[in-house]
Amino acid sequence: MQERIRRLNDKPLRDGARYVLYWAQMNRRVDANHALLRAVEIANELALPVLYYEGLTCDYPYANDRLHTFILEGVPETARRLARLGIGYCFYPRRRRSDANDILYRLAAGAACVVTDDYPTFLARRHNATVPARLAVRCEAVDSSCVVPMNLFEKREYAAYTIRPKIHRVWAKYLVDAPPVKVRRRWQDPAPEFHVALREDEIGELVECCEIDHSVKPSISQTGGRLAAERALAHFLEKNLRRYARERNEPSAHATSGLSAYLHFGQISSLEVALAARRYAEEHKLIAEEFLEELIVRRELAFNYARSVEDPASIRNLPEWAQQTLAKHARDRREPEYSLEHFERAKTHDALWNACQKELLLRGTIHGYYRMYWGKKIIEWSADCESAVRTMVYLHDRYALDGRDPNTYTNILWCLGLHDRPWQERPIFGMVRYMSSDGMKRKTGVDAYLREIAHLELTGKDPFRLAEG
């Protein structure tokens, strides 16, 4: 556990406290949550109960119905699981900007200490850099997003081949089940006065009354929450793991896990997924190495990158060769050149690119292989690399369920050479890898994908959406 912990301030534990506070910023789950386990560990030492605080504000960047709904769909099950464990729960949805915005500080006033999530992007990165200094008690951040703790890699890794052997050397130590949550003192007090008890049938009404962007509707393909994450994992193991290595780059095959949004919002952990995949593979005599490579090595390379740089979305973080070659071709003619509005509305001349963008608009995600093509073309059709990155970040932040994530910024900058190598020189891209529509047609079933996205657009329904229950 110690390798996962970072002290965020030098404040003491509070004498006479009523509880230990866990602040769930990114890992919105009860199971396999090392930050919650750390809060329980401290609480047990102090003979105190644990209070789990989960907030949802209306003013985070690009707050909209899609993101709000996905988060809120996890709240009722979180409440049920915490109640069974004897842990208190405070859920506070800040509906309007005029509503109270100091709930964490009110709760911290009664806490022996605050434990939260160690996460290198989006609000958690900002909060962990600014909030602890304003607290009067100890604040710790705990990494429960990675299988191998981020703290083990003090320096920035520059490619999968450099981090892979380091992960493989230690992953036997960390690729083990998280211990069960066992509190010595159960929560007995009423919920805090600003707690909102939420039922599944109240989610739509709550979203509607929030001061957020209501033009971005919920995903037509994915339901949020722990139970949905467990269904998605079970479906992947039973239907897709055996064909993952062979068909993962064929979007119309639907052979990937579909877990990226659940991992991003912390509704399931990469540790749980990795262990489940390894055990299922062993039991059914399958090979899971390709999937574990993506889930652990590639994903944790992204976390290492985001943790190691000041601005994960900046092209200044590209390798020197990529910066030089892109600068050399900065004045190359772009033809056509599209505006943000053209990109956002899927109004380009390229049917495949438009379909990728429509998948983002409707499903809230793009298949990983086509997302690379989607990004490369934004570079090709933008005035310069900086505006291309801004477009990609904006579209992911606003529409993608798995956006605002270390993988988001790593994948965007991969399109400009991050974690890649030089290729043959060509206009605009220089020696950065190029991808063409003809290449996509040779390697993937483009026509099948176009028909699928057309069906989504026409009907507003996804035949690949998993049934609930």
Image (cartoon, rainbow, N blue to C red):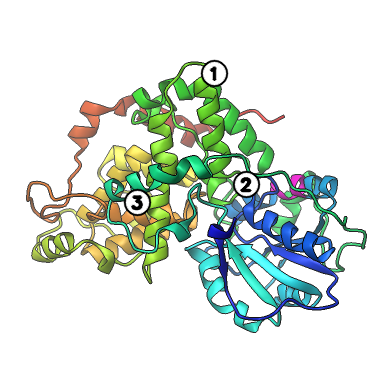
Q: Amino acid at mark 2?
A: Gln
Marked residue nearer the N-terminal end (2 or 1)? 2
Image quadrant where residue 311 sits: bottom left
Classify residue 124 as left or right of residue 417. right
Amino acid tagged 1:
Glu
Residue 271, picture quadrant: top right
Q: Label 2: which residue?
A: 267
Q: Is residue 248 above or below residue 203?
A: above
User: Which of the numbered marks, if any, corresponds to residue 283?
Assistant: 1
From this view, report whether residue 135 is shown above or below residue 366.
below
Residue at 52% over, 63% down: 62
Task: Give the class, few, some or many, for how many residues have Cα within 10 Å of label 2's Cα (few <14, many ≥20).
Answer: many
Write down the region rendered in magenta. Answer: 73-78
Q: Is residue 192 left or right of residue 93?
A: right
**Res 145 label:** none
User: Which SS type dominates the magenta stretch?
Assistant: helix
Provide the secondary structure element on which disc 3 rests. helix
Tell me the residue that label 3 is attached to.
411
Q: CA distance from mark 3 to mark 2?
A: 22 Å
Query: Of helix, strand and loop, which one carries label 1?
Result: helix
| Of the image marks 3 and 1, the number of the one nearer the N terminus | 1
